[in-house]
Amino acid sequence: MIVAVIAVPLTSLTARIDRKKLLLTALVGYVATNVISASAPTFTVLCLGRVVGGAAHALLMSMVSAYAAHLVPARQTGRAISIVFGGASLGGILGVPGAAALGHFAGWRIALWVAAGLAAVLTVFIAVYLPRVGHGTQAPSFTLARKPGAVRAFIQALLANALFFLAHNTLYTYIAPVLMAHGLPESSISLDLLIIGACSLSGLWASGLVVDKSPRWGLLVSGAVMVLGILLVCGHVVSGVATVAVVALWCSGYAGVIPFIMSGAIRTRATSADIAGAAVNSTSNIGILLGAAFGGRLLASYGVQVLAPVAIGLTVLTLLVVLLSAQAFPAHLGEHEEA
């Protein structure tokens, strides 16, 4: 919730600050949140530490795509964003089970101290090796749009993003009962999710190959893969271990969506790349929140079996939005198209 609310205003307020210094500030925030949480004497202090982490996360994820875009030629913006989110996904795949295992064997405070140490090492590495990039001289706003319809295209990209996240999280938030309904034991869920997360990297890899060439068709294919995977879950076509493969297919399609949305929002030039990234970050978190709440209500009222059909309907609706958003997601990009 914190990320959804503060991502855009925080990015706007820091628009004049050197991007590398801002990136390092966000990473110092990661160090601070883990140090505060690991040493927290009370639950109130622990919550304060997590608030600091939420702010740092909002700032980092809002600017990191734009930072990556500044490091490469304009025609490679989408691929750079794919690599960024591939790293984020890999971090989640390795970090979540790793931290959980460390917390189990050594205690949660030790896990947080280790996270703080890793964040500190990363901060030093970036300070030494990552170059500075340009930053704006004034706070970004929609008035910077350079072509008719830019703001409309930007809003279309944000709407598609929120809907994709809503569709995915309506079902995926409750993936554990879904997997168990398909015959998988509760004891295997953690390993199943690790496999699914690892397989989802293939979607980011595939999208990186076409995101700077055919945004619309690549996004539609990614969404169609989502629909296919969820449809197989919905129809109980598979059971047991095969369900993991089907969910991995769906999540690969979902992962592939992200670079198309982020690069599409940046390419509209309705605002600065940093504000575009912040807005996408904000709408992503709104989609996550609404998806979890909506899915929870459906689960409580109608049972797990209704989640997949609703997720399919929402994904199809999102694909219709993409089809009607030609300016945000053009069929083809020229060789020297600006990002």
Image (tube, rainbow, N blue to C red):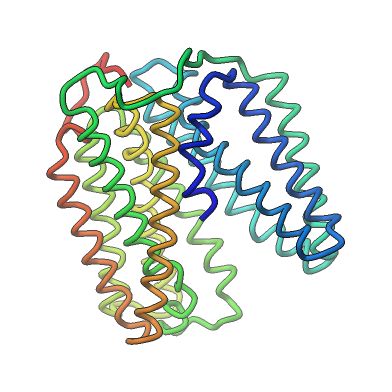
Residue 244 vs residue 83, the one in the foreground: 83
Residue at the image point whose x is 59% and y is 18% from the top: 18
For the C terminus, the image quarter is top left
Residue 186 vs residue 130, the one in the foreground: 130
- Residue 50 drawn above or below residue 236: above
Q: Quadrant of residue 280?
A: top left
- Residue 337 drawn above or below residue 200: above
Q: Position of residue 143 (x, y in %)?
A: 30, 22
Q: Quadrant of residue 100?
A: bottom right
Residue 163 vs residue 286, the one in the foreground: 286
Residue at the image point whose x is 36% and y is 41% from the top: 206
Q: Position of residue 244 (x, y in %)?
A: 44, 69
Q: Position of residue 174 (x, y in %)?
A: 45, 73
Residue at the image point whose x is 71% and y is 22% from the top: 127
In this picture, residue 317 sits left or right of residue 58: left
Residue 131 vs residue 182, the one in the foreground: 131
In this picture, residue 64 sits left or right of residue 236: right
Q: Position of residue 79 (x, y in %)?
A: 40, 30
